[in-house]
Image (tube, rainbow, N blue to C red):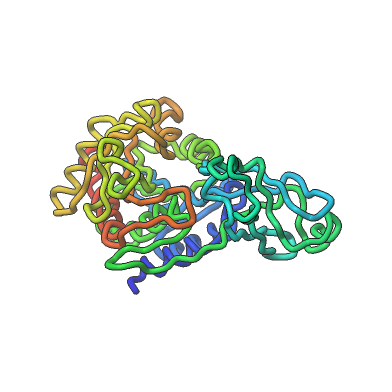
């Protein structure tokens, strides 16, 4: 197993829903500390790892948080109702095993449903909404649930671990964006002869409004920035190439525009820099014009008086589920692209 795959496995298996990224932050800090000159955690909880140099100042950003749930109500029988933290497609929640992160430690639960034997014919084709779901932790009453540590406000994540699929494909939870975190960690390790100052920023609360990116970019005020993330692919049943031209196995995706331009339209000098870094180092890449989601770069590029920003993403299937699928080769190429771009940033900015 390659070193970066082992790091991804630890980060993917770790739990850190938005606002509760502490355990993920600790893994990253321990891994990257030997390779930077300074490391700190800011008021929001962003981890900022700095390699000191001269101008320009480059900010690399990857968010640590994953989507999850939060307990909002415990009924008299001990069943937990919840809110969604981040963007879930409700159907992917039903009948999942979850972990409730209590002050007493992890408590396991399941999102239950009626057995098919008793579902009325007219209800079989109806989608069950998250607001109608509940988590069963095995409690017999509200008091019993509270006794084992479950309270209103308890954060919840999926109980799922990284596994190897065929070829170089892996599946796991929270690849969005623990894969991006690995990109930053490994790129910092691989950078050579970097003249610029590099801030590798592992941000908080991206899934609920790009919050950590917004505050850290304001505080650092870099000359240029790259956000790393994952992005959707158009190479599996249920989606068409016209909706996403990205494919697994064809290298990192370099964003031209996302969210129909409402997110970010990458400045031409940034795009030229990233493309040249890839092409001059024979790194296969794809270009992306997206209609859906956006990344930390959207918040970063609007900070202060504007920060030129780009995005490098890993094409990933089934994003925002516990069973995302990606290619280890694509991750490796993405790491190389970030490292090579950092080495040449002083020639462009």
Q: Residue furthest right?
A: 143
The reply, left or right, for residue 14 in relation to residue 337 is right
267 vs 256, nearest the viewer: 256
Identified at 68% across, 50% down, the residue is 134
Task: Say above or below: 233 vs 257.
Answer: below
The reply, left or right, for residue 145 in relation to residue 342 is right
Identified at 57% across, 55% down, the residue is 16
The reply, left or right, for residue 174 in relation to residue 189 is right
Task: Say above or below: 187 vs 7.
Answer: above
250 vs 50, nearest the viewer: 250
Instruction: Locate residue 138, reporting x and y percent.
Output: 74, 63
Instruction: Locate residue 51, reporting x and y percent.
Output: 38, 54
Task: Say above or below: 246 vs 166.
Answer: above
In terms of image quadrants, where is residue 325? bottom left
Instruction: Locate residue 271, reporting x and y percent.
Output: 24, 36
Task: Say above or below: 151 vs 59.
Answer: below
| Placement of the N terminus among the 4 image quadrants | bottom left
Asked if residue 113 can be seen in this view, the reply is yes
Identified at 35% across, 67% down, the residue is 165
Q: Residue furthest bottom?
A: 1
């Amino acid at each position: 197993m390659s070193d970066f795959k082992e790091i991804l496995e630890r980060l993917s298996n770790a739990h850190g829903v938005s606002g509760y990224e502490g355990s993920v932050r600790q893994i990253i800090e321990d891994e990257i500390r030997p390779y930077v000159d300074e490391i700190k955690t800011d008021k929001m909880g962003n981890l900022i790892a700095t390699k000191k140099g001269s101008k320009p100042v480059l900010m690399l950003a990857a968010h640590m948080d994953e989507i999850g749930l939060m307990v909002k109500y415990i009924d008299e029988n001990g069943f937990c109702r919840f809110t969604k933290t981040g963007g879930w497609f409700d159907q992917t929640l039903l009948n999942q095993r979850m972990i409730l992160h209590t002050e007493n430690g992890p408590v396991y639960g399941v999102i239950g449903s009626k057995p098919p034997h008793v579902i009325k014919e007219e209800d079989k084709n109806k989608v069950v909404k998250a607001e109608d779901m509940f988590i069963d932790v095995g409690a017999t009453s509200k008091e019993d649930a509270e006794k084992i540590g479950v309270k209103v406000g308890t954060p919840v994540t999926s109980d799922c671990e990284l596994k190897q699929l065929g070829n170089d494909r892996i599946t796991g939870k929270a690849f969005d964006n623990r894969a991006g975190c690995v990109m930053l960690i490994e790129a910092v390790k691989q950078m050579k002869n970097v003249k610029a100052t590099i801030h590798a920023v592992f941000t908080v609360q991206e899934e609920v409004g790009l919050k950590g990116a917004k505050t850290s970019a304001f505080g650092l005020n870099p000359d240029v920035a790259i956000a790393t993330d994952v992005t959707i692919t158009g190479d599996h049943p249920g989606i068409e190439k016209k909706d996403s031209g990205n494919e697994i196995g064809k290298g990192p995706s370099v964003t031209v525009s996302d969210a129909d331009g409402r997110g970010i339209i990458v400045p031409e000098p940034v795009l030229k820099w990233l493309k040249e870094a890839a092409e001059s180092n024979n790194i296969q890449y794809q270009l992306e014009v997206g209609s859906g989601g956006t990344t930390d770069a959207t918040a970063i590029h609007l900070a202060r008086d504007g920060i030129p920003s780009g995005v490098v993403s890993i094409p990933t299937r089934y994003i925002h589920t516990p069973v995302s699928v990606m290619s280890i080769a694509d991750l490796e190429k993405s790491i190389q692209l970030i490292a090579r771009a950092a080495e040449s940033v002083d020639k462009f900015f």
